[in-house]
Amino acid sequence: MESLLAFAAAVVSLRLSALLAGRWRARRAPELAAWSAALAAFAAASAALAWGAAAGWGPAAFRLYYLFGALLTAPLLGVGSLLLVRRSWAAAVALAYAGLAVGIAVAVPLRGHLSGMEIPDSAAHLELFPARIVAIVGNALGTLAVVGVALASIRRRPLGNALILAGVAVAAAGSALFGVGVASTSASLALAAALLYAGFVARPRRR
C-alpha cells in the first residue's frame, strides 16, 4: 500500500509539474518555472519512496528521496512564491542552493545500514551538519515564503491559496517538507500532492 500511495503522489505531482511547465512556456512567468521544478522534485521524491517501499531501501533510493523531498521541494516552492511578488533575486539564490543540495545529497556519508521496507529516519543515517541543518533551514524558509505569500494574496485566490496552504500543512505534518525531511507515511505525500494540485489549478476569484 505504501508503494502504491507513493506512486500515486508521484503521478499527480508530475502531472501538475507538466501543467505548470506548459503555462510557463506560454507566459514566461518565472514563478511558474520554479513551481514546476518544485513539483517535479516532489514527484521524484515520491517515486524514490515508492522504490524503497517496493524493493527495499538502499543508499541510492534514500539519497534520491532526501535530495528531492528534504532538500529541494519546499525551498523551490518558496522561491516560486517570492518570484510571484517580484523578488527577482530569489532565482539566483535558488540556483546556488540547488547546487549545494545536490552536493550534500551526493557527498555526505550515510551512517548505519539501510534495508527493509520502512521509511528510514534521516536522524539515524545523517549527521546533523550539514545535511539535516541545511534541510531544516531550507524547508523552514521555503515554507515561510509559501505561507506568507499565500496569506497575503488569499483574497484574490481564496480557494486556491487555502488548498495550497492545506497541502503544505499536510506535507509538513508528515515531515516530508519540514524538519527532518522524511515522511512518516506515503499517505501524507499522496494527500499533499492532491491538495497542491487542486490549489494550483483553482481559478482566482472573479472581480
Image: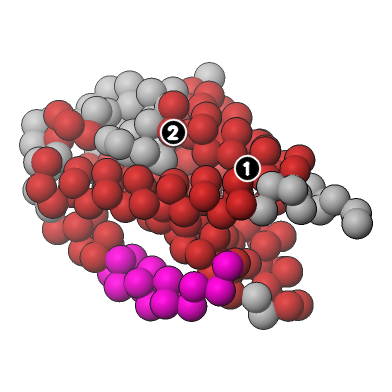
Q: Position of residue 181 (x, y in %)?
A: 33, 38
Please tell me which residue is depicted at 27% across the width and 60% down the height of the picture. 101
Image-based side of 66 in relation to 2, left or right? left
101 above or below 68? below
Residue 15 versus residue 159: which sits nearer the camera? Answer: 159
The answer to whether residue 205 is visible is yes
Q: Which residue is mark 2?
A: 172
Q: Residue 140 occupies which quadrant of the picture?
A: top left
The quarter of the image holding the C terminus is: bottom right
Q: Which residues are magenta?
A: 85-99
Disc 2 and disc 1 in contact, CB within 8 angstroms: no
Residue linked to disc 1: 164
Classify mark 1: residues with Cα within 10 Å, few (<14), some (14-19) or many (20+): many
Where 169 sits versus 65, above or below? above
Going by the image, does 141 lie left or right of 132?
Answer: right
Q: At label 2, which amino acid type do we have?
A: Ala
Q: Is residue 77 magenta?
A: no
